[in-house]
Amino acid sequence: MYFVHPQIKFNIKNLGNLLSCFFKKTNLESLKKVEEMFPAKKVYFTDMGRSAFRLIVEELQLQNSQILVPAYICDIFYSIFKQYNIFPIFLDVDKQTFNISLEEIEKKITSQTKSILICHTYGLPFNIQKIKENYQLLIIEDCAHSFGAKRDGKFTGNFGDAAFFSLYKIFPTLRGGMVVLPSGISKKLAKTRFSPRDFITLLNCCSFFSFLFKKYAGKVAPKYIKKEKLEQVGALNRVSLNILSWQLENFEKNLKKRRELALIFQQELKKMGFETQNSENNIFTFLSALVPENINRDEFVIALRKKGVFPTRIWHTPIILNPEVQKEYNIDISKFPNTIDVSQRIINFPLQNFYSQKDIKKMLKKIKETSVA
Ligand SMILES: Cc1ncc(COP(=O)(O)O)c(C=O)c1O
């Protein structure tokens, strides 16, 4: 069975490593590797990516200001915009990159705009230099999908005025965010502990439990959306930090292999009529494509699940399709044709660092049978 969210390959060695994450003290040395990725910056681990974004809002003093935001992004930002009285202006996206299109900035920027949120969607780095050269905006990099992705030899997170990451998209860390800022923060992050909710998430990193959750808890799970643990911005708990430190051991090697598999996968998908995301510098945290126009994406996903391939549809409901957002900001969705088309045709295929070419071939065979059936 094949799943999209980070999985742990089941074997005795991994089980031992995982168990030890519950008992050992955090190895701060191995986490230094992360700090070295951002030489001129300060790095903090937070409970979730969204808490890292809140910290940025506070540090860059974005309260009561106007921000440019991709229309194609998750709606977790809505409550934060409300909390800090931030007014978003949404930008349509490009269909080859799924990142924002530059013309949209030119069309929508106003004299009141203070900042821009740039998302390196699915792991494809956006060229931030072009924005720096042309606009006086504070740039916040959303690196939720791009930990380890580089452009011009530099890791994403180094290009803007601040950046944040969501670690559990990339590592089986249960939860976890990270913020990268130009200087230290004044306040202390609140302590968080490993919780029963985290334990369920940990089980979900093993394909046997993922299958049970998908089969029997499919309707229940979306009701229990992950939330930040605290009102204040919280730090990352010890168990998740330990899992991160373990997963960093072979990170670069794994990323190289992941890219190789993704490129093979993409080639074959193209032959079947899928429109794949640009691949240059892409680390494929999500291996994403648009289904051919003659395929009903939702039926296709259901049919694949029956064959043991569990794709996701991130984001079939991006922020501008949230009814509350539409009402609050008076959104006319006809102004976002690309975002709407992408949300209706997007599919993310399973890809794990430990997959072999044989796994990719098996999945492709099932995809082929399903897309022509
Ligand atoms: C692009 C993007 N930004 C931010 C977030 C928020 O991250 P987290 O779930 O860790 O709060 C997510 C995921 O939900 C995301 O996909």
Image (cartoon, helix red, strand yellow):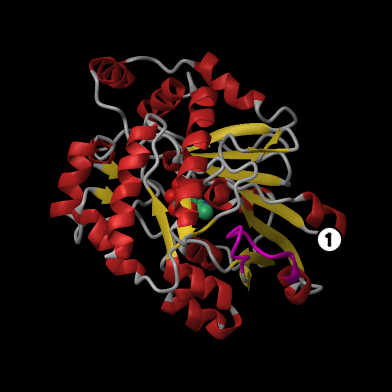
Vertical comparison of 158 with 279: above or below: above
Q: Amino acid at mark 1?
A: Tyr
Kindly identify which residue carries mark 1.
Answer: 135
Displayed quadrant of residue 351: top left
Residue 326 highlighted magenta (yes or no): no
Single out the residue that lies furthest toward the right: 133
In the foreground, 100 or 184 = 100
Q: Is residue 114 above or below residue 206?
A: below
User: Do we see residue 184 in this rendering?
Assistant: yes
Please state the horizontal and vertical placement of residue 37, each as a whole percent of the image. Answer: 65, 28
Residue 288 lies, with reference to residue 68, above or below; the image says above
Classify 260 as above or below 321. Answer: above
* Highlighted magenta segment, given as a residue range: 93-103
Question: Residue 14 location in percent, x, y?
Answer: 30, 20
Secondary structure mostly taken by the magenta-highlighted segment of the chain = loop
Disc 1 packing (10 Å; few <14; some 14–19; many ≥20) = few
Q: Which secondary structure, mark 1?
A: loop
Instruction: Between residue 236 and residue 76, name the one nearer to us.
Output: 76
- Give the residue displayed 52% in from the left and 68% down from the top: 82
